[in-house]
Image: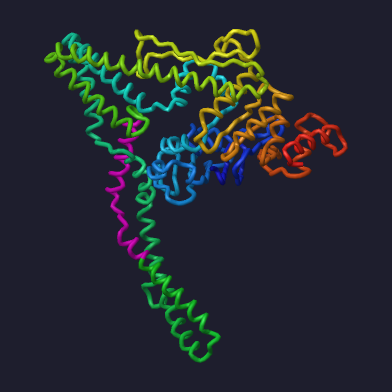
Amino acid sequence: MLTHLHVQNFAIIDDMTLDFSEGLTVFSGETGAGKSIVIEALGFVLGARGDVSVIKDGAERMCVTAEFKSACLPTDIRTQYHLSADRFTLRRELDKKGKGKAQIDGRAVTVTTLAQIGRYLVDFHGQHDHQSLLHASVHLNLLDHFAKHGDLLTHMQTAYQTEQEIIAKLDAIRLSAQEKERLLDLYSYQLKEIEDVHPTADEDVQLETALPKLKHAGKLLEMAEEAYEELYNTENSAASRTSRAAKLLTQMAELDDNLMALSQDVNTALVTLEDAAQTLGSYKDDMDVDPNALDKMLTRHEKLKRLKAKYGPELTDVLATADDLRLKIKNLQHAEEHEQDLENDLKTAHEHVLKLARSLHDKRMKAAEKLARLITEEIRPLGFNQVKFSVAVEMDEENITSTGADKVEFLFSPNPGQALRPLKNIASGGEISRVMLGLKTVLAPTVPVMVFDEIDAGIGGETGHLVGQKLRLAANGKQVLCVTHLAQVAAQAHFNFHVEKTATKNSTNVTISPLVGETLTTEIARMLGGNSAKTSAAFNHAKELLQEVNRA
């Protein structure tokens, strides 16, 4: 569960801190007030793409920190990321030069790592995400996510890759000698380029952590020596003066008990000073001011940057490219020796791939039936009295890929007597939003935080009321964050925040304030489009909406 979010210099947010609790939290405000910026900031700290253009005007860097309860993560994930405390903190920075920092509990990590752990924490549904539901290409992934047959998919991908490697070897045999020599030269050159640098995973992160200290080693050493002298190493140092004072106070305390506590405090301060001096002494003794070491580190860092630019984006990708190049070179060098064996291996590999594809198809058919039933149950109360929803799974054994041989498409009929048709051909914007809400409720039960950015697009009235109720139910035992323009949705929240944009001559900023009591009723009345005065019909309607959920 998300407990705390701190945003600095992000878009038009100057410095903002929000605390969160379990349940449905709603952000509301005028159009253009910046409601979605909070969601974007949360996405940024969880590994979403960062852009220097988002940094607030006049600031050098933006920073977002998010605190989560670790109990919401599976045990193996907590172990993988070394999260032993009750809570952990994710932090990400980006400066004007495009240089970023990512941390988990103060430990430097890659942005990719933030994104990996983020998938276990938050499920986002943005304003335009529902459009992806119109594309059949995403339906297969959604069905597989629901079916949870990840191991079988992994076997399928491995078997398919094996088959493709055999095909590549056979193709290599049939290459002309000239083409084979050209490819060998190319692959060998690329491999040598990587091997000459000999990178290791996350080496760039370690260098970026060490470089600032090494760049300023001379100045740091000079300052450390001066501080050490002031603390400890001269007759007039702080430790020497404190030692003399401690002795005097000890003698005075023997004569006046009222000075005993003060004597103890000064003696404790003396110990602290001596410890600090020893630590500082070790620091300066270990300081390396060798300019050659800095040159080597900078050169090394530049080489790694070039490799990442050409074979990246991360060093793990560079290492994977090297492994792939070695395999290609080996295949080209030895392919002709085993052509008949390869043809036999290809036949066996294809039979294995086909068997796995058929097994996946059978499991997807069963999962599709269950998914269709659950989604129908979820969306029927949202204004679809006689809705029909189906997940079509068609197998094409002539076109097998790493995900199998299936094409999956969601079919939908919102009205009685209307035939099932592809979702993209029949659903309106409001219907798509409701279907997506049903999907998210069914597909993300294990993710502790769900985020909906204007899930209510294209709906209103009673349907909006039903969507609000569904969001409140979805927040039972977890967290749902929602940006909305609908009063019916906002009234169902456990917690409400009002987002307001304020502009001066020289700057624009966002303020976010909690809404309770009369301020909440006034905001609901505004969202209803009426007068927010206490005697107005809109204000009374707002009170009725809140009374329905015992909030007025």
Counting from the top left corner in percent of width and height, residue 424 is at 56, 13
Judge left or right: residue 337 versus residue 110. left
**Can you name the residue that lies furthest to the right here?**
535
Counting from the top left corner in percent of width and height, residue 332 is at 18, 17
Residue 303 belongs to magenta span = yes
Q: From what the image shows, is residue 325 above or below residue 82?
A: above
The answer to which image quadrant residue 152 occupies is top left
Q: Please state which of residues 156 and 161 is positioned toward the viewer in this rendering.
A: 156
The answer to which image quadrant residue 313 occupies is top left
Judge left or right: residue 432 versus residue 243. right
Q: Please state which of residues 472 and 322 is positioned toward the viewer in this rendering.
A: 472
Classify the position of the C terminus by image quarter: top right
Visible residue check, residue 507: no
Q: Residue at x 64, y 30 (%)?
A: 470
Visible residue check, residue 136: yes
The answer to which image quadrant residue 22 occupies is top right
Residue 459 belongs to magenta span = no
Counting from the top left corner in percent of width and height, residue 158 is at 30, 23
Q: Please state which of residues 216 and 376 is positioned toward the viewer in this rendering.
A: 376
Q: Which residues are magenta?
A: 279-308
Q: How is the image coloured?
A: rainbow
Counting from the top left corner in percent of width and height, residue 281 is at 34, 65
Give the overall secondary structure of the magenta segment: helix
**Can you name the residue that lies furthest to the left here?**
337
Classify the position of the N terminus by image quarter: top right
